[in-house]
Amino acid sequence: MELPDRKMRILKAIVRNYLETGEPVGSRTISKLTDLKLSSATIRNEMADLEEMGLITQPHTSAGRIPTDAGYRLYVDDMLSSERKELQDERKQLLDMQDILLERQGKLENLLQKVAKTLAVSTNYASMISSPTTRSSKIKFIQLSQVDPQNVLAVIVIEGNLIRNKVIPVEEELSAENMLKLNMLLNTNLCGLAVEEITLGLIEGIKRNAGIHTAIINDVIDAAAEIVRSEEELKIYTSGANNIFKYPELADHQRASEIISDFEEKQALSSIVQETLAGEGQNGIQVYIGEEMPVARMRDCSVVTATYELGEGMKGTIGIIGPKRMDYDKVVGVMQNIMGQLGDLYKPAGKADAGTDSGQAADPLSPGQPFTIPEIRIPQIKRIEIKEI
Amino acid sequence: MELPDRKMRILKAIVRNYLETGEPVGSRTISKLTDLKLSSATIRNEMADLEEMGLITQPHTSAGRIPTDAGYRLYVDDMLSSERKELQDERKQLLDMQDILLERQGKLENLLQKVAKTLAVSTNYASMISSPTTRSSKIKFIQLSQVDPQNVLAVIVIEGNLIRNKVIPVEEELSAENMLKLNMLLNTNLCGLAVEEITLGLIEGIKRNAGIHTAIINDVIDAAAEIVRSEEELKIYTSGANNIFKYPELADHQRASEIISDFEEKQALSSIVQETLAGEGQNGIQVYIGEEMPVARMRDCSVVTATYELGEGMKGTIGIIGPKRMDYDKVVGVMQNIMGQLGDLYKPAGKADAGTDSGQAADPLSPGQPFTIPEIRIPQIKRIEIKEI
DNA sequence: ATTAGCACTCCATCGATCCAAGTGCTAATA
DNA sequence: TATTAGCACTTGGATCGATGGAGTGCTAAT
């Protein structure tokens, strides 16, 4: 949609003013606000036109105008397409804070949670961030071990030092020798492959090559393959849901309750993440306004999403959810900033301490070294002989 | 505090009625409600007495009465001390639903999340559940392995098949032989010990016995010990925060925002958990009413907490947070029910399939077998000889 | 000791009124 | 022809007062 320059400027002025105040904005306000020297009467005429075009609307007859979804859309598209020189400034401005925040963390989980919080705090909107996908990440290392007579522990390390593990119950204990063979077998066949390359056929092939054929071995191979293949669950971290109370248009019981609920359940957010990963927006940033929201219950909101990339193929989504009158400029700026920061994370970093953190989850950010892995190799177990001491 | 029977009955009637309606309750209502055949005038007199005792109060001069914190307290204490026969019924009633819900899950995380949700749905209040402590759980198995030249993977399995892992960055690669020695050393010295028994002194001892003395080895031992010793972080799962909107006294912006925020941050909830684990209430259930709340920002709420036990020493806390006028009877019933269910989880269960679940977290509920572990043993690696094929 | 009766208090509700902000239209102006 | 000043009109929100219902405390009767 093309718009005469003057109308466009008036529209922008309306949108910007409404973003700030949340109040319908009248002709007089615009007249004073813009540098086009026009009287309120002229503005009124233009506004009548804009309304006819469906870009703005008035809540009731004698009120000012507020942007429609289409109005926002035009505003946002214009913003995204034009070179944003201010963004540079905003990025700089935020860098300090970010630097502190993004100090090397032990656990990916904590990092993501912190990023979510930073986003929420610095924008005053609700935020979310999804864990990165690992579908195309390569397997680095597999290890099975007999924890006790009934349980085998399987640990799989994938690129980025993400760790998956599981205890596999077994009917009877495996001999140490078989266990070692199994380890070699799995490592030789699976290391270096991307997670998505592990097919059922491949697994069957491995079973045939196993040499030893017991039900147990087959079960264990299946279980191990399952861990690798298992659709990694999409985890979503959120923060600042209570920020919605800052915007009266979202803060009534009905709406607030729904939004809070969606934030707790994560289900709805997940569909936004899917949507984002599917379609690529300009600059990697996508904006859904009101009715465009993938989630019906959030049709009073807008969401700005972006895809971040941690390492090769490890993509995730960050999102800011707020009222339709959100400060899109600022949000996009913050977003690009964070994207940059996250992208930088897997580049070589300064020497760091061996973090004292630990826990069930993995350590994705090996302190003090590059995030990517030089080459895949098979553990150097060649042949093993077991003797009593 | 002792109260004449009649006054007690009137108090209970007031509380119960207020719990239901949320409206101040008048003398006439009570007169009709109770089976003591008394006129409203008599009730009025008694109510005046109760008010003097600080058990009830009127929001304004010409309104009915509502219970004070002290009034609630008396009511709750009475309820908790008397044998609750209705509870039995409620337990039965809920069992079916629970059985479905508590089907063997792969991941502790998912289980806890589901329990939280169940609590929230069945009570209509907000709920939380903390991950169980593992301080006194025993170490079952330790394994270090060289993932790549710069990284050593440490995996520790503790009782209940909980898994902790971490990638330890190293300056130079360890020889296979040293790695094996290290594994043996750690397993021999640490397996069977409770997490809290691992002292710094013990670690030093191990280092001295290591035989091989390089900085690397020491670092790795330190890192491994750190994982074990690291104060396990208290994870808290919540659900149903949006339920607070169902209670007008909590649903105004100010309060709602605070509560939601506390639920997101988990910080405040954590202090409730600590408090609960510290003091033992009757039946393992504790109730904090209004001003008794450990968290200042939640002084308009009540919380009912209970300690559940998964296995030996694995204790966690469940909690229901709602308005002061919460249905304490029901909540306590549901609570006891869930406690029982969780307690039963580590008793032998029917044969189950080898679950297809996996992920970064552990599998605490080894399907198809007892949750507790028969005996600790050292992995049967005795002596290793490495040869090229 | 209990109860009926009554005067009193206070809040919630409803309607009426008023006011500010903003519009659309018309006529004057550059 | 585009812009502007002026004006009548609309409308929702705030304010105010009156009304009525629910509940109380007190007194006198049972």
Image (cartoon, coloured by chain):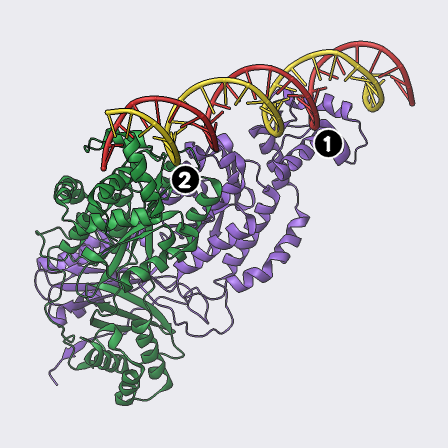
Chain colours: A purple, B green, C red, D yellow
Residue at (20% x, 71% y) in the render: B138
Front residue of this view, candidates A359 and B248: B248
Q: Position of residue A170 (x, y in %)?
A: 12, 60
Left or right of residue A177, residue A162 in this image? right
- The chain ID associated with circle 2 is B
Q: Position of residue B201 (x, y in %)?
A: 30, 85
Would residue A10 be visible to someone looking at this image? Answer: yes
On screen, B86 above or below A3?
Answer: below
Front residue of this view, candidates B100 and A77: B100
Left or right of residue A112, residue A153 in this image? left
Residue at (48% x, 51% y) in the render: A308
How packed mark 1 is, by other alpha carbons closer than 10 Å (few <14, some 14-19, many 20 or more), is many
Tell me the tag on residue A200.
none
Q: How many marks?
A: 2
On screen, C2 above or below B104?
Answer: above
Residue assigned mark 2? B249
Q: How far apart are labels 1 and 2 at the CA level?
A: 41 Å
On screen, B170 above or below A146?
Answer: below
Same chain under badges 1 and 2? The reply is: no
Q: Position of residue A236 (x, y in %)?
A: 39, 49
Front residue of this view, candidates B320 and A315: B320
- The chain ID associated with circle 1 is A
Amino acid type, residue under disc 1 in the picture? Ile
How packed mark 2 is, by other alpha carbons closer than 10 Å (few <14, some 14-19, many 20 or more), is some
Front residue of this view, candidates B36 and A25: B36
Left or right of residue B105, residue A97 in this image? right
Residue assigned mark 1? A30
Q: Given this view, does label 1 or label 2 mark the residue nearer the observer?
A: 2
Amino acid type, residue under disc 2 in the picture? Glu
Helix, strand or loop at disc 2?
helix
| Picture quadrant where residue A257 is located | top left
